[in-house]
Amino acid sequence: MPDPSAIDGKFAPPEEYAQVLVIGGGVAGAAAAIEAARLGAQVVLIDENPVDPGLMGLDVPLLYGGRMSGAVQRRGRLIETVLAANPMLEEAIERGVEVRLGLTAWGLYVNGPALRALPSPMVGLADEDHSWMIGFDRLILATGARDVALAFPGWDQPGVVGAGGLHALLQRYDAFTGRRIVVLGSGDVGVEAALTAHGRGLEVAALVEVLDRAQASPEALDKLAQAGIPVLPGHIPRRAVTSRDGVERLILADRRGAEVVIDCDTICLAVGLAPAIELINAAGGRIAPDARRGGHAPVLQGWATSLPGVFAAGDCAGLAAGETEAAEQGRQAARQALGGAAEGGPSAGPDAWAYQAAWFDALTRDADPAMIVCQCEAVTRGDLLEVRAPRYLGDPTAGARARDIATLIADGPPNQDQVKRLTRAGMGPCQGRRCREQVALTLAQAAGLPPADIPLALHRAPVRPLPLKVMADWGETAAMTHGWEIWFAIPGQWSAYEDIGTEREFVTPFGGEA
Amino acid sequence: MAVAGAQVVVVGGGVTGLSAAWWLARDGLDVLVLDKGVVGWEASGRNGGGASHYHSPLFHEEQRLWPLMDELLGYPTEYRRERVIFALNESDLAAYHGMAAEGRRLGYVADHIDPMQVRALVPMANEANLGGVHLHYGGHANPQRTVQAYAWALQDLGGRIAQHTPVTDIVEAGGRVTAVETPAGRIACDALVIAAGPQTGFLLQKVGVRLPLGFGRAEMIVTEPAPLMAIGGVDGNGLYGRQTLRGNLAFGGGPHEWIDLASDGPVARPSSPLTRNLARRVAELMPGAASLRLIRSWAGVIENTPDGRPVLERLADPANLTVATMSSVGFGLSPASGHAVRDLVVDGRCSFADLDKLKLSRFETIRDDWLEERGWLPPTLPESPARALG
């Protein structure tokens, strides 16, 4: 006899279906879609750009730093801009790929050991008004990379953008309001951000590097020099001076500790990007620490993830070395997804965590404990070090005062999700995007461990924060509606204790059945 | 690294095991908690945080203790007394009135409230609500904060916790447990408590004791913060929920999935598209919250006995082994269940409640295929792939 309140049979089949579903319309995703279409598959490509301005205000999915213009409100025009920014999308459309822009892929669901109730593998999609599910036979994730943010005093004010956010506003949306920027980080990410901004006619005041020498290749540094953009090695950002409109100046300390002041309206954090693994991680796919692939990256065989039918390519698979490589990865992933042999694999880049940790150590040396780390929940660096509960819980008790990050680590091993639960760092509406790496680096620093030894704080669906009314399944199945119970609905579970074993055991009014 | 033995070893650093250990440490006993992972990591830290279990023999002790817990533990649990339950249809209203009657029968204050009173207490509530009940007892606490509070309070009393230390075997001699085996070596004990949630049955098998359990996955969602309501505990529309003191709305309910579980527990606990059905019901219950962003969903895996009731018993054989599974309703009752376990371990009987009906012997005659009989089986996987590739 089936359990009527169990989940079996209550999910509807997905509203639509793609033989090959591609999430992400960057170079890797577009190349994957084109290749899959060329091989005869029915292909749907989903891209979240243009992103809802409300999400952009939360720095989701990238660190836009409040430097977007009113143009982000005009979706019709933005869709054209987004299409124009990646000519491969036009090619994909010509090849018969169904390209759908402005849709959010907020969840990935695949049957596995602890979830077998799905009628098919599926991805949750949403537009501005509602959400629905799309089924797939093969999924290629090309979700790109996320900004890695590190705090310095003033970083929570408008004008502090990430390299990814800057790139999106400049190239994809043509909607950037800054005019004079300073780039933090002299690796490839920083140089690319600087050259992109320069190419768009913006003034790039400097690239700042806390290490003793610039990190990018000599060729890249040559291009910077040709553009007249200075690099300042051995300089540590101290604070941003801000007004109501945000950043006005950046104060640096040079090697001797002397103050260097740079006027700017935008500070671009370019110390790293992290593979956008949210969907695969939330679905229970295997992720492993791999600093040479940008941090936590999917475990891959070829381009196949540990989830059946799910593949990854481009930056989300481990920071591709450039657009040419990303496109090739996309094509390889598509061929493998459609039955071809595994070919290729992610390339190894510089040690992302070593570089981020060097920056983190420099920025946190003598840092003010009042510096905000988690913007959503107003958690400071001091709160993290003290593992302090939020202020609305009152002053710390004697016991709480005796606890800090060192005692937690001694009880160990260090665990970011535990710190999150106690301090709320990472629990806010931006879903930890702005503080995730910093909290992990705080733990690594305090424990004297490499960042790879700090377990990944888990991502959860929805991987974009969407309103309840958008997420809601307003057309759920009758089986869901009629089989809905508040808890397990085990007959007699809520019977009064004295009724157990009597004729009244199964006739109490709550939960019991006659 | 070797772990020294203890007078009492508690297997399971969930809310029941931690509370039990804390109660035992308050008696001055040398207590060691072993957890296969991180304390409070599983269902103990993932539940709805409710504390209104009128059906339980531990109810009065639950109600007595919760208002004292912050003080007793020395750490905040975010406990907030009282609960509002309101209806969007007549049959729910009748059920809620029945709950209130049960509360009053047990000696507590429970008011019927009209739709306007509902709106006064829950400003975001559906204007078309039919009224409900206001329970002046029960309430809710923050599960994550509470499990950590138990753990720290235990340590403050000299108790020890070894995380990432699974018990792989139980050593017996002369009808008593003498030690447990772990990857950190053999750990001796004078008494053993098994409060290991879904793993409890697997551990009992090692001493030849059968505890029938089914394993279910349940899910919750949480929104970004909303303005604080007068009473954070709100149920209705098939949901249980609470507002955190930060303002987030955390709600759960709806169908569970029965899962197969290995003795080392689930590797991943993915949530499902049920997120959308939960979102719908929260938006229906409180249209004023419909524009709030849903920021996380999560799932927990919980064990259930065949009748959905706890097993709280010190066994006859081995005579120093106490079993504590709360059968999917453990968090709210934890202050009292820990007290009960302390009593069983130290005195052999519970000082404040009759627990005779929660003994393991009630399942002696249950058939081996009881899970099949009840339909507590994982769903049958669909044919795959759904469509052949072209």
Image (spheres, rainbow, N blue to C red):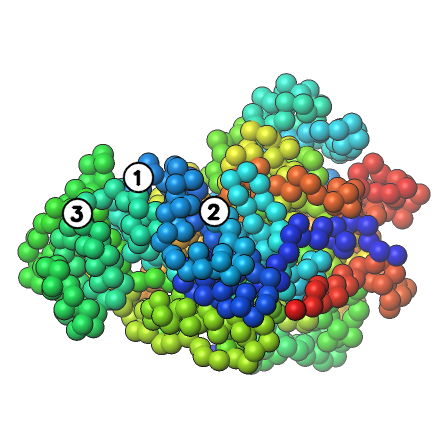
Residue reaching furthest right? A503
Residue drawn 75% across and 29% down?
B89
Residue type at the position of mark 2: Gly
Q: How many marks?
A: 3
Whether residue B193 sits left or right of residue A182 in the image: it is: right
The residue positioned 52% from the left and 34% from the top of the image is B291
For the residues labelled 2 and 3, the Cα–Cα distance comes to 30 Å
Mark 1 vs 3: CB contact within 8 A: no
Q: Nearer the viewer, residue B359 or B272?
A: B272
What's the residue at 43%, 40% (across, down)? A76
Give the class, few, some or many, for how many residues have Cα within 10 Å of label 2's Cα (few <14, many ≥20).
some
The residue that label 3 is drawn on is: A180
Q: Residue A69 shows which numbered tag? A: 1
* Chain at tag 3: A
Q: Is residue A193 above or below residue A500?
A: below
Q: Which residue is at a point 11% across and 49% down the rendered structure image? A: A262
Instruction: Check residue A102 in the rendering and tell me which mark sits there, or answer none.
Output: 2
- Residue count near mark 1 (Cα–Cα under 10 Å), binned few <14, some 14–19, many ≥20: some
Return the disc, 1 or 3, that comes first in the chain's sequence.
1
Q: Amino acid at mark 3?
A: Arg
Query: Are callouts 2 and 1 both on one chain?
Result: yes
